[in-house]
Amino acid sequence: MLIVLTGIDGSGKTTAARSLVAAARAEGSKAVLLSNYAGRRRMSLLSARLGTHLPARLADAAETTMRVFNVLLSTVRATRFEGLVVMDRHLHCQLALREARGLRRGRFLPWLLRTLPAPDLVLHLEVSAEEAHRRIVERGTDEESLADLTALRNAYRALPQYADMVKIDAGGPPAEVLGRLIDAVDSQRQLKV
């Protein structure tokens, strides 16, 4: 079973993905976490350290290349794994980033998204831009403005795939969010049987 987690920065994707895999393993199930990072945080930290700012198209090209590579690698790994596969981020995330930056979706990413094996479930972690910003400031490892997070939230909602995503309220404590994730996965398992 392949599960993909999406959501704006600060929505708790990585924490939720780790918790979901740990919960499955605790029940005796085989589960693996596959991360599809684009290197955006590292690039922004490096840019800040060097006192420069990459042009949007150049940053997008670097991020898209890294994301596509990771998604393709994760897809191969997922097809070889017997059990629950949780992907932290996917091509949806890169499409939303492009939309938020005012860049065109292009043809390649939508084509690749249609061509790759479809996940059994895409779980979108919903959280307000304000809450996400508070979390990002609290962890202190990266910087996102409230305006950027709002634009990204709107960009996800503009994706054609958004209507098919299962929305998970990620505004509460991690244990509550995990419970909602487990309920969504269990419901999908029952549909497949």
Image (tube, rainbow, N blue to C red):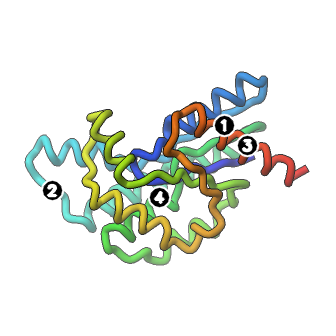
Instruction: Kindly identify the residue that appears in the image at 76 percent across and 37 percent down.
Output: 83
Circle 1: is it few (<14), some (14-19), or many (20+) Cα within 10 Å? some
Q: Which residue corresponds to the image point at 36% horizontal and 56% vertical from the top-left? A: 63
Q: Which of marks 2 and 4 is nearer the N terminus?
A: 2
Q: Where in the figure is residue 188, as x and y percent of width and height?
A: 78, 51
Q: Name the residue under label 4.
A: 93
Q: Which residue is identified by label 2?
A: 53
Q: Earlier in the sequence, mark 4 or mark 3?
A: 4
**What kind of element bears circle 4?**
helix
Query: Disc 3 designates what residue?
Result: 183
Mark linked to residue 155: none
Indicate the amino acid at tag 2.
His
Q: Separation of disc 4 and disc 1 at Cα?
A: 23 Å
Q: Earlier in the sequence, mark 2 or mark 3?
A: 2
**Proximity of marks 4 and 3: CB atoms separated by less than 8 Å:** no
Mark 4 and mark 1 residues within 8 Å of each other at the beta carbon: no
Q: In this view, does 39 lie to the left or right of 26?
A: left
Secondary element at image label 1: helix
Q: Which amino acid does label 1 sit on?
A: Gly
**Where's residue 135, x and y in %?**
36, 40
* Neighbour tally class for label 3: few under 14, some 14-19, many 20 plus, Cα within 10 Å: few
User: Dot 4 surroundings within 10 Å: few (below 14), some, or many (20 or more)?
Assistant: many
Which residue is drawn at the image coordinates 65% and 66% (left, top)? 164
Does residue 78 lie above or below 118 as drawn? above
